[in-house]
Amino acid sequence: MKTIRISDMTMAQGSKSASISFREKIELSKLLDSLGVSVIELEGIHQSRTDALRIKSVAAAVKESTVAVPVTLDKENIDQVWAALKLAKNPRLQVKCAVSSVQMEYLYHKKADAMREAIREAVAYCRSLCADTEFVAEDATRGEPAFLHTVLEAAVEAGATTVTVCDSAGIMLPEEFAAFVKELFAAVPALKNVCLGVCCSNHLSLADASAVAAVVQGAGEIKAAAYPTGQSSIANVARILAARSDLLQAVSTVRVAQMSRIMDQIAWICQTDGKKATPFSGTAQEDGGIYLTEHDDITAVAEAAARLGYDLSEEDKRSVYEAFRQIAKKKEQVGIRELDAIVASAAMQVPSSYVLETYVINSGNTISSSAHLRLRRGEQLLEGVYLGDGPIDAAFKAIESITGRHYELDDFQLQAVTEGREAMGQTIVRLRSGGKVYSGRGISTDIVCAGIQAYLSALNKIVYEEGEV
């Protein structure tokens, strides 16, 4: 019985990936890993700092699946991607290129021979870095068959362990695509020594059938998506393989019994249009069983802070560790939430560019919440009024309107510091800018005031680091 690898493309699609927050991508990768997909594909590096951090974070979160990232034909880009990906348990580098004449000249300004040589060099260099290297012919069904065959042969000779052909047009019937794959094996004998992958567009709603037809002809990997992106559906392909494994003599590693529940969670993450309308969209962060004790050294504390998304300087690491030690002496365990608060209070203490002067909040069950804030920046007074889904949301939106800045709200935490009617509340706000997390802390008997203070504290750190004080 042959095991067919299922490669998820949900996060590799730029339009869909852009609507998912940094944190949601980490959660999505964990869900896909638990679902049992063989490969999780990501977008490549376009903005080096942000994208590299995204790749590193997903690579650290995924425990079993292969993490695949595309590279360009440029060695510098390959080095950047590999630096971010190499710590993954199962890394894969992907060389993706168009192979039709029109696309080669339009995108790469290369003729056939030059393109084949560039692909050979890129694949060989990737293979020198990573044992799992894939070549993807993005518009294989549109290319000249003779040239496609020589390109695939060159990729295999250069060291590609997986070669994927794509029907990007999506107009082939399953029988036609099966014949196309059969012809590839006949024309390129070297394909029998590697895994042949297929990727089918769902333009005619036949992607699932075409992918399964390719399996019958010897394909060993199917690119699909857990959430609709225009390719084959993981749910459909996995069910077909599970139901007809006797005929196909093939199975997948997808956990079909758990699929419905996990797919619902994935759909909730990907259906983010409504949530993106408000800056107050961060979800509560779970401890996940992670804790530290007084026996942990500065390296362990810094690593835990890095898992939260913080990129601490050496000075901040020392400050956070000293604050951690004071707390660890008084209790057996320091949880991840407490460490978050320690970082917020001890790391990167900066001058206040924006200072809260006054705020007025109106809220009730029959009116929309509104916030009127007055901030001071130097000698300048700035005011803003905004409506929101609750007092905190309205306050945060008012700050955004005043400052003209919008950042992804990575997390919002509210904790009681003291007990009783006049209890002090501590608020932690984590903002993400340029792939880096900045946290602020606010303490007050008024949770709205504490939230505003925390937001401004994080905002001031971003402003200071960006040199706009």
Image (tube, rainbow, N blue to C red):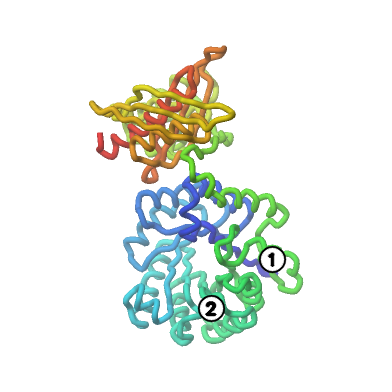
Between marks 2 and 1 in the image, the one whose residue lies nearer the viewer: 1
- Front-most of residues 275 and 336: 275
Kind of residue indicated by mark 1: Val
Kind of residue indicated by mark 2: Leu
- Residue 277, position in %: x, y? 49, 44
- Residue 324, position in %: x, y? 44, 24
Residue for badge 1: 251
- Is 468 drawn above or below residue 120 in the view shown? above
- Residue 49, position in %: x, y? 35, 49
- Front-most of residues 140 and 400: 400
Q: Quadrant of residue 46?
A: bottom left
- Is 326 drawn above or below residue 43 in the view shown? above
Going 27% across and 29% down the picture, which residue do you hit?
A: 377
- Front-most of residues 127 and 415: 415
Specify the quadrant that holds the N terminus: bottom right
Label 2 crowd bin: few (<14), some (14–19), many (20+), radius 10 Å: many
Going 56% across and 12% down the picture, which residue do you hit?
A: 421
How many numbered badges does the structure rendering display? Answer: 2
Contact? badges 2 and 1 (CB < 8 Å): no
Q: Which mark is residue 191?
A: 2
**Of helix, strand and loop, which one carries label 2?**
helix
- Front-most of residues 450 and 306: 450
